Image (tube, coloured by chain):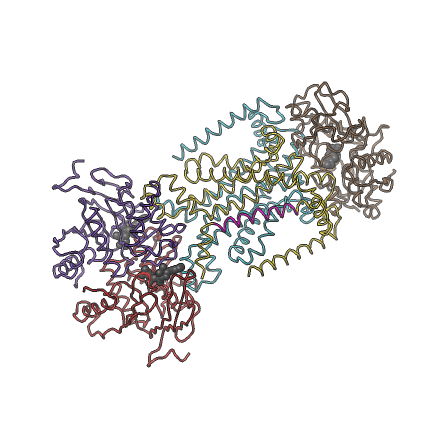
Chain colours: A yellow, B brown, C purple, D cyan, E red
């Protein structure tokens, strides 16, 4: 079954490559280079290590940003999910933090966090914390009321109810938020690098645009796609370690 | 009969292009039987690409983009030099820096590595015998002059028009090196695909003539243009700034001899050679192949 | 505060004119008085929807009365204390913990779990005949097995006051009677006071020192048990017990025996 | 209670304005203009109608994009949530669609969807469908197994189980996804306008940068913030109409 | 296929050597045979965890046997048919629908709801003594009220075969006996065959045409009921009934009466 899906997925990939090839024939190399050209450049760049430092830079920014943003997201999500009062106080500012495009504030980020990795990390964190915040807050708010009564009975403190009930019960929803956050963290790191970076896949995209080296740009896009899939896959692997995925497996019969 | 033509612009519809935007009031192109539309873009490369995809007939773009496209095998025709004058510069407030040579070892801000500020800075450095590795470049994005004001960079690469609001905002006693004093590569061209040129040569000629007329109009009526820009240009809120910008573009539109839109093959060739030497394009170009001079 | 000793008994629990209304005002408990002396078992019977579960939750401090007061050992109650245990009408287990961990949960929330706790949990599981399921996930248990896990969980903290809301409803007679015996033994040994809601007349007759009938939000009648001479196990077979059962049935309004 | 929260929220706003004012005094007008200057420009622009057409353009793009993206997100979420097989087939491509920065593909979007509103709408839809997809898929996968058995017993078709069980039961999670999607749709419309637009708040930001008119840009950012809060508020109002929020209210006592 | 008529009876349900194992292999039903003729009520008794619920789900087609076959009216069963009703051990109501809509749900999934359906639903709620809750949300009901909603939902499609898993466990004796009477009436009037799991011996004795005792995944004994002469309501008070009950208790291994 899983094999068949992988096969079909592969087939779809081949089909998309085919579409790509066909479209590429219609337009200039500068707009859409052919798959083969792109993969050749990609392969060369991988072999001679050209991409390595850029990938590393982006990955580091992304991971640190994701950790910071993830932590912040879960934390704020807990606060907002726990206290309707604080929710009313903060949510406007959280929404504002998302509605304002980071690119527009680039000079401030650069001023506050310098031109190095830090500003990229901050932007990544800022972009990816929101889905986790919403997921966590929602998960915490929609707990089974019988279980809540049980915890009240056991005289559980707020923290205990959170830790032993709300968070484990809300895990599926939180992981779903993480899945979105992980993908957004890639976008975040890239946006950060667009603003002014010497290294990183985002910087490479900008540089390739300057030289109108569309082939190189597409090679970078493929790297990004692979990176995105790896990150997403990691979340899936993590999820498979969690109790509820085992539970579901048990129940099916 | 009217024929429609579309320009792929390197930017949105901004003040410095008021001559194009004044079409409604003055109908320079309509007179020539041309129904003109403009596609906004985000950079000269975008403009060129939007033209290459057939979204537009003519690209309003910078030489860097044209050289790159040619080096990548596109067959283009340069019809017209919109701004024979190079409008890029390097600005510093550091008294130690008296000539481009003094930039060695300094921090210099650029917009981004895909922008004209980068390419033209390299040209300036090259003419001063320096290279990219002699300086520390900082992509400051839209921050423009702010890092300079904040002291985060020693100099910043910009354009003449960007300097206008900066000086108004209190950029004091700047030391300005104009790229045109080193190598006056033109700022922008009208470029078409060769196939378009062959198909619509007559129409393109009419277009160029109409464009020249519009430029002439803006040179002659800068105040009216500045007024119009308030309504027509997305960035035209302040008529006084408009006026300054229009003045700058009016100046940039004229070559050394005070002529509008003269195509100078030699400087275009020299630009291509310099871009190749700087590693901005991967091969040498024979530019005369790609230039069709439209005479009146 | 002076009310918690009545006629020489120490009151483990006292309800004073307790009234309660749900928000939608469809149902109300009206001025209920009840006293549960230390170490006694009281059973509440009553028709479905008469307010037994609501009253139990009020007595435990899980709900706060609209009017009236609830005292545990003379202290006014506003939230559940650490000395009580409660078996809910629905088992309410955590599916991400094993049976053993579900049972140990109340301890875990209070302090470090010791080997003694684990041993005691295992003893409880043994008594409740579910030790073989200690490492199972609750969702794979049968209805009766789940309800027994909930009972073990209520006992793990050795409460002095235990609330049970139809705890044996999902159990077969044999298990049920065995657990009744165990409960009575526990009650005698540890002096745990119990408030027990059941629909089973025999169960109430067997366990209760006093019986209350709740009817439409009020206590419609109450009755002290006769004193039993025989050992518990045999009591059920005596004529006296059978008559007592019939008595209770009459209180409930059941016409036949 | 709610009043106190609003007050505190306002106070926090005042505090942030204060911080803004202080920071603005430290740096050039070009980086961070003063609040008062910004609000003056904002107020003037609103009064003389300067912002109107830009706001309208962005709002139209955003709403159509959100509707399209929302529909697509829920639809794909359902498909992926319902069929682990199709999930395995598609999820790689969905992740790729998110990992690749839309800005890099600007010429292709222009080619396929024109330089008018359509390309902005498509980008908006593409950016905002993902959180809804993840939320819907997750909601659908984590349904109470007893209720599922009930529906099997009633011989419910797949669609019925979806419509009468999985979707209503998953509504809290889906609305949470919508909350993220709505905010991302604003980002999407903006990104769409960054790649080249004549009108719209994104176009205005780009223009203001060209003019180095940071004050104007901040005025636009404030408009964006307000727009974001309105959108988010609308989702909250919508949520309050749904059964589960009433349910929760009932249970609290 | 020839097996569905046995001794002149039409078999509503037949289990043939049905075996079942849960994935974790902790429990197994072993080669169970059972026949339920049209219009009869059969009751299964057995200790908690003996496999009653599992067997009921197998009989309804909710689970598929590892070995053996299940037939409804001679047709092999692989999934639940539209002619059956099932009352689960846990009520499992949808909290986003009113009580009435919960009851009507099985109809809604099959076809347009008519006023007749609504009328019938209201009749059922009346019989189950919960008509006043028709517009309530299930989460505001008491345990016994919830379980009655689930019963109404199982009856709404007028099934020819009804499975009930301890349906009355959460009800008081009076309601319980009234509902037993109603169920019997329904059975006689509409010829609905029923498979009824209960822990209540009196209930089984009162309802069943045949009783089966399930023990550790096997049918340990079965017993036909005596034929009753009296009307149902009075039957419970006869000596014959009481003796029958004691009989069943013995089958279950209960020592005292
Ligand atoms: N999903 C499951 N996975 C594994 N084992 C299970 C599962 N469900 C039930 N069991 C086991 O199968 C056995 C029979 O369960 P079943 O629910 O049929 O019992 P029952 O006779 O209905 O009991 P009760 O009277 O307590 O409801 C039990 O020992 C139980 O632990
Ligand atoms: N959350 C609630 N909101 C409104 N009414 C409620 C709520 N919970 C229970 N009720 C109503 O209050 C009454 C008493 O409910 P309660 O659960 O106390 O009954 P009970 O005696 O325990 O019944 P059972 O024997 O069926 O468990 C019932 O009529 C019920 O419908
Ligand atoms: C007068 C004038 N000013 C600025 C630019 C902008 N520009 C210069 S080079 C380049 C390509 C990379 O961005 C762009 C967009 C221009 N074309 N013409
Ligand atoms: Mg109750
Ligand atoms: Mg069972």
**Rendered image quadrant of residue C241:** bottom left
Corner quadrant of residue B20: top right
Picture quarter with the C terminus of chain E: bottom left
* Secondary structure mostly seen in the magenta stretch: helix
Q: Residue at x 65, y 37 (%)?
A: A194
Q: Is residue B292 rendered to the left or right of residue E95?
A: right
Query: Would residue E257 appear left or right of A92 to someone viewing this image?
Result: left
Q: Quadrant of residue C129?
A: bottom left
Residue C137 at x, y = what percent?
39, 54
Q: Can residue C213 be seen in this view?
A: yes
Tell me: residue B271, above or below residue D145. Answer: above
Q: Does the magenta stretch include residue E210?
A: no
Q: Magenta residues, as a range?
A: A222-241
**Camera-side residue: C240 or B20?**
C240
Left or right of C254 in this view: D217: right
Considering depth in this image, is C175 or A92 the residue closer to the camera?
C175
Can residue E153 be seen in this snapshot?
no
Q: Where is residue A226 in the image (x, y as percent from the top left)?
A: 62, 48
Say above or below: A118 vs A7.
Answer: above
Count the numbered circles shown: 0
Q: Where is residue D174 in the image (x, y as percent from the top left)?
A: 48, 49
Q: Position of residue B200 (x, y in %)?
A: 82, 46
Q: Is residue A236 magenta?
A: yes
Which residue is at 59% across, 42% downward? A186
The N terminus of chain E lies in quadrant? bottom left
Residue drawn at the location 61% of the way across and 35% of the way down: A103
């Amino acid at each position: 079954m899983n094999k068949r899906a992988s096969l079909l997925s592969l087939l779809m990939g081949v089909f998309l490559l085919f579409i790509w090839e066909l479209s590429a024939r219609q337009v200039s190399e500068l707009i859409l280079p052919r798959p083969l050209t792109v993969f050749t450049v990609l392969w060369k760049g991988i072999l001679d290590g050209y991409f390595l430092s850029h990938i590393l830079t982006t990955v580091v920014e992304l991971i640190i940003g994701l950790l910071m943003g993830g932590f912040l997201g879960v934390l704020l999500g807990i606060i907002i999910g726990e206290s309707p009062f604080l929710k009313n106080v903060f949510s406007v500012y959280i929404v504002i933090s998302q509605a304002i495009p980071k690119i527009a504030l680039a000079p401030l980020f650069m001023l506050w966090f310098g031109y190095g990795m830090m500003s990229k990390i901050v932007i990544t964190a800022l972009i990816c914390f929101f889905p986790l915040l919403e997921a966590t807050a929602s998960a915490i708010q929609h707990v089974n009321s019988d279980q809540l009564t049980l915890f009240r009975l056991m005289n559980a403190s707020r923290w205990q109810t959170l830790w032993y009930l709300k968070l484990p019960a809300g895990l599926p929803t939180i992981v779903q938020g993480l899945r979105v956050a992980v993908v957004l963290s890639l976008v975040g790191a890239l946006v950060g690098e667009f603003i002014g970076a010497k290294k990183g896949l985002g910087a490479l995209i900008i540089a390739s645009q300057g030289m109108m080296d569309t082939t190189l740009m597409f090679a970078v896009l493929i790297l990004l796609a692979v990176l995105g899939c790896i990150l997403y896959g990691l979340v899936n692997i993590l999820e498979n370690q969690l109790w509820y995925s085992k539970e579901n497996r048990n129940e099916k019969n | 009969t009217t024929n429609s033509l579309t320009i792929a612009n390197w930017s949105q519809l901004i003040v410095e292009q008021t001559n194009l935007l004044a079409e409604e009031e003055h109908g320079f192109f309509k007179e020539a039987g041309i129904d003109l539309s403009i596609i906004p873009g985000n950079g000269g490369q975008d403009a060129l690409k939007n033209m290459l995809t057939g979204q537009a007939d003519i690209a309003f773009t910078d030489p860097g983009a044209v050289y790159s496209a040619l080096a990548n095998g596109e067959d283009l025709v340069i019809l017209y030099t919109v701004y024979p004058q190079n409008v890029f510069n390097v600005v510093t407030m550091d008294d130690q820096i008296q000539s481009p040579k003094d930039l060695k070892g300094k921090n210099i801000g650029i917009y981004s590595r895909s922008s004209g500020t980068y390419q033209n800075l390299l040209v300036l450095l090259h003419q001063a015998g320096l290279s990219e590795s002699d300086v520390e470049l900082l992509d400051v994005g839209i921050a423009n002059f702010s890092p300079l004001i904040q002291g985060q960079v020693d100099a910043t690469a910009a354009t003449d028009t960007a300097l206008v609001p900066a000086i108004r905002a209190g950029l004091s006693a700047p030391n300005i090196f104009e790229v045109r004093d080193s190598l006056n590569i033109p700022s922008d061209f009208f470029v078409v695909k060769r196939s378009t040129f062959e198909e619509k040569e007559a129409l393109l000629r009419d277009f160029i003539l109409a464009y020249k007329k519009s430029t002439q109009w803006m040179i002659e009526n800068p105040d009216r243009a500045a007024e119009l820009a308030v309504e027509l240009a997305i960035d035209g809120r302040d008529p006084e700034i408009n006026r300054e910008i229009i003045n700058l573009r009016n100046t940039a539109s004229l070559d050394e001899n005070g002529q509008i839109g003269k195509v100078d093959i030699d400087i275009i060739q020299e630009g291509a050679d310099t871009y190749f030497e700087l590693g901005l394009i991967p091969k040498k170009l024979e530019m005369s192949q790609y230039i069709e001079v439209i005479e009146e | 505060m002076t009310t918690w000793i009545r006629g020489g008994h120490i009151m483990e629990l006292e309800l004073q004119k307790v009234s309660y209304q749900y928000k939608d005002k469809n149902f109300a408990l009206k001025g209920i008085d009840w006293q549960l002396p230390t170490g006694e078992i009281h059973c509440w019977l009553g028709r479905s929807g008469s307010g037994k579960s609501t009253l139990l939750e009020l007595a435990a401090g899980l709900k706060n009365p609209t009017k009236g007061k609830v005292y545990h050992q003379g202290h006014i109650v506003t939230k559940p204390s650490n000395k009580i245990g409660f078996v809910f009408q629905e088992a309410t287990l955590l599916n991400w913990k094993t049976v053993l961990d579900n049972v140990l949960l109340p301890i875990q929330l209070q302090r470090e779990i010791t080997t003694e706790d684990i041993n005691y949990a295992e003893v409880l599981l043994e008594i409740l005949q579910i030790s073989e399921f200690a490492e199972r996930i609750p969702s794979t248990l049968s209805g009766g097995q789940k309800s027994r896990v909930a009972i073990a969980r209520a006992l793990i903290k050795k409460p002095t006051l235990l609330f049970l809301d139809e705890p044996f409803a999902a159990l077969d007679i044999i298990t049920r009677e065995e657990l009744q015996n165990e409960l009575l033994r526990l009650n005698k040994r540890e002096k745990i006071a119990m408030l027990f809601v059941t629909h089973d007349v025999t169960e109430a007759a067997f366990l209760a020192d006093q019986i209350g009938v709740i009817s439409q939000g009020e206590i419609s009648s109450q009755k002290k048990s006769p004193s039993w001479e025989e050992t518990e196990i045999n009591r059920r077979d005596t004529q006296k017990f059978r008559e007592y059962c019939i008595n209770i049935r009459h209180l409930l309004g059941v016409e036949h025996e």
